[in-house]
Every structure is written in structure tokens, then in C-alpha cells.
Amino acid sequence: MNQIVRSASWCEFEYRTCADDCPLNAAEARLREVHRHWHDCARSYQDPEDFRVALNSTIQALRNVTFALQAAKSAVPNFSSWYEPQQTTMRADKILRWIVDSRNKVVKQGDLETHSRLNVAFVIDYTDEADLIAREQRTWDEFLRCDYANMRESTAQVPVGMSAAEILSDLRQLDLPLMVRQRASVLFERRWVSADMPGYELLTVLAHAYGRLRELVLNCHELLDRKLARVAVSIGDDGNPLEYTIEEIDRIPFRGGLQCMLSTRNIRTTRRRLVDGTVVTEFISHRSEFDPDIQEVLDTQKPYGEHPDFPTERIGKLQTSEQLAELVEFYRELASGILRSGQDHACFTHYFRNGAMCDSRLHMTIDSQGKHALASEIALIALENQADVVVIIGEAWTAPFQATVDGGHVPPQYHPDRGECLFISAVARSGATAGMTLPFTVLDGVPPHRQIEIGTPSHLRSVNGMLIPTQHAWNQAQPSLTGEAFWRAQTRKP
């Protein structure tokens, strides 16, 4: 009997996968407990005592998964011969081995011995944001001695006792151009680690252990002749499920982990503006949902003109530059209609997997610091969706490069000869890219009643900066430097 699978109220990525008569129901229930305790750890991360309590509960719940799995062996054909090599593999995993040892220690002695580390990173542009994925550890003294041109490669481990105010005060002594100082962010990242495994952050340790055990339980279903599959749901005009597509898969995504566990940096990190120390919170990413009422207006009133046909036949899997260029051209036609209507064009990202769209987001922020934060968020959304293509569309200021007397440069929005354009930039996991800029001039009025003159489109020779963290998340080679990042590379001291 088909059942509609709904996510848990406390996490959109928690689904029940076992049927009612599945002998592995108890093991799945224990996994669900681990997942829930993991979120308790995340919520209490900034409170040491609450975090230790949640940590102990999660470790004990992890051990219960294997107990529940072994309890079902009589109902699973060939379980013993299958499970023995699985145990050997688990014993070779030092994190799982640490979980077992820690669990015994918690039962006998109480809390784990933990200590905290505080890392500070300096973010000036999108390349800095991308480099945080594979950052270089540096001491606090080395960090303060770093010159501006080399700042991009700097992350410091700070004495835990230092307050945010003290750290910001030290950083403000750095000799930075005014425009850089006004746009820079400082990221404070707390890392809880165990004294007997200092190289691993504990939320990540728990996520790894959960993923390995979930992978174990899911693979055990194959002994019951149940196959791994991905279920996709298309939504009808009334907002209800219209069609279910089941695609068998040959491996478990994320090595058994869940999308909410892919990155814990947003949980562990506070982002502040260097110039005044305020916390950067004014950025948001809304999921774009289908709205039948809006679709009816677009179909009947055509405020943006005729809707172009989506180039399904020409885009294939979207892994070549030519295929991406077809997608970029489609969005250019859409965006041109929006501009001609008098509206401004918001910043959107669209995510594709195997040539089909799997997510769409609307992004909003108020300053450069918020844009840097959104760039990391876009990368995480791509990972969560297992997307292999991301497209970003929005409006931007353009201006010729102009250096300042203190060694910085004038941002386009402050340049006296600034112009406006609509940009479309696409990146694929294969390494392919495509992009386009569409210059326009506002002749009169304000949105939604602007009068616009659209210029001649030109192809982008580089990737939009907000997609650089996504390329790093995909472990792609360092892209060519452009804009401020290019200038900083030229001024870097040998």
C-alpha cells in the first residue's frame, strides 16, 4: 500500500523509511532518536553544560542503534554472515570506536571531558568566504601580523578567554583601506572537541557516526529484498501531490548522513561587522514555492509578456558550457520581460540535478557582509539538494575600476560613473560555466513603474562571486580571480 511520506515536525529531512511490517522498525526508531538528540546538541552549542548533557544522550542513543539492529537478526535472512564484515569495518573507524569508548566512560564517570576552541576568520570578499571551506589554521599573533594583501589566507585560533570586543579592538588596529574596513566581516567560530580526540569537532563527529549507522541500517534492507530509491514528488496546480517518481539509486547520498548535518558552521559561528561590531543577521533565503494564483495572473494577464518555452531538449543534463548557455538564454528572456514591465529583478538562485530543477530560492540582504553570508548559504543549499548546477540571477551596479589613495578601491555603487545591469551566472559540478550581463538604463520612475532602456547583452568571462563558495564546496579548482580578488593578488607581497 502506498503511503504519503511526511517529514518530522522538528526537521524537514527526517522521514520514516520503514513500512509497518519491517523488522528493522526498531533500529530506524533508534536512529530517529539520535537525529533528534543531535539537534539538541546543535541548539545548545553555545551553552557548555547543556551541550554536554545533549552530547551524552546522543552518544548513548548511537550505541542503541546497533543493539536494535542485532535484535532483529532472526527476522533478517543471512544476517550473521552479512553483519560480521560490517562489524570489522566499524571497528576500523576510529570515530565509531571513540563513540563506544566515550559511551562507556559517560556511563561510569558522567560527563565527557571537553574543551572549547575559538577560531576567528576575516572576510573581505567572496573568495575569503570560499576559502573558509578549506581554511588554514594560524595563531592569533600571526593573524595580527598579516598584511591586508595576504589577509585572505588567514584564519586564527584565538585564546578562548578573549571576548568579541577585545578581538574586534585588536583587528581594528590593522592598517586597512577605509572601503575594506566598512565591508569586512569577522567570523567567530566555536569548536567543541574532546580532549582524547582533539582534531575533530564534536557535532561533526556525531554526524559522521550517525551517517555510518544509518548507512548500515539502510543497507540491511537489501537482505529483505528492498531497494534503495529516491522519491520525487511533482506538485499540481492546486498545491497537492500530482505524481510520484521513484528512482533506484546504487549508493546512499551523503554517506548515510542527512542534509541538516552537512555543515554545522552556521550553528557554531557568529558573524560580525568589523566597522561597528554588530552581528550580521540581515540576510535571508526564501524557498520559492509554486503559487497557482500567481501562475494564473502570469498566464492570463501576461505582465511580463509571453513566457518563453523551457529548453528541455537542448539543456540535457546541464554539464557542458553549451547546455548551460541555453539555460542562461532562457533566463535572459524571462528577466528582460520583468525589466520591461517596470519591476526590478530580485536575486534568485535555481538548483538543478540531472537536468531537472530541484529547488529555487529568493535572497535578500542589505550590505556586502550579508552578501558574503548568502554566498555560503547558496553553497550549502546546493549540497543539501545534491544539485549539480546552480544559476544565480539579479541586478548589480557596474563601474570602471578606481583605486583609492589608501590602497583600496571604490565599490561600484559609490562610483560617479556607475551603471546597472542584470547578471545571469551558471556553474556546473562538471566545471562548466556560462553567464551573461544585460545592461539597462532607468529613464524615469521607480519600481514597479520604471521606464527601462535595455542594452546589448554580453557574455560573462568569469563566474559571479556569489557562486565561488559553491565551486569550492564541489571541490573544483580555484577559479580565475576577478575584481577585487584579482587586484589583491597583484598587490600581495612575495
Image (cartoon, rainbow, N blue to C red):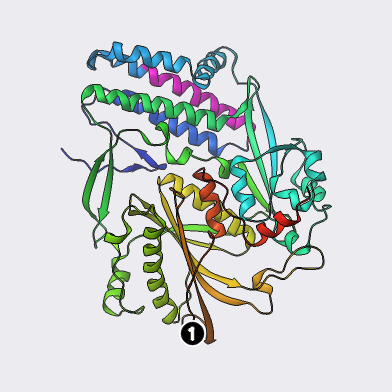
- Residue 230, magenta (yes or no): no
For the record, the magenta segment spans 47-67
Residue at numbered disc 1: 453
401 over 33 or under it: above or below: below
- Residue 60, magenta (yes or no): yes
**Helix, strand or loop under label 1:** strand
Q: In this view, does 273 lie to the left or right of 172?
A: left
Question: Secondary structure of the magenta portion, mostly?
Answer: helix
Q: What residue type is labelled 1?
A: Glu
Quadrant hosting residue 256? top left
Measured as percent of width and height from the top left, residue 439 is found at 52, 76
- Viewer-proximal residue, 290 or 478? 478
- Viewer-proximal residue, 437 or 289? 437
87 over 325 or under it: above or below: above
**Where, quadrant-wise, is the N terminus in this rendering?**
top left
Q: In this view, does 85 lie to the left or right of 150?
A: left
Measured as percent of width and height from the top left, residue 31 is found at 39, 28
- Viewer-proximal residue, 105 or 132? 132
Residue drawn at 24 percent across, 63 percent down: 237
Residue drawn at 54 percent across, 14 percent down: 101
Question: Is residue 302 visible from the viewing direction of this image?
Answer: yes
Question: Is residue 426 visible from the viewing direction of this image?
Answer: no
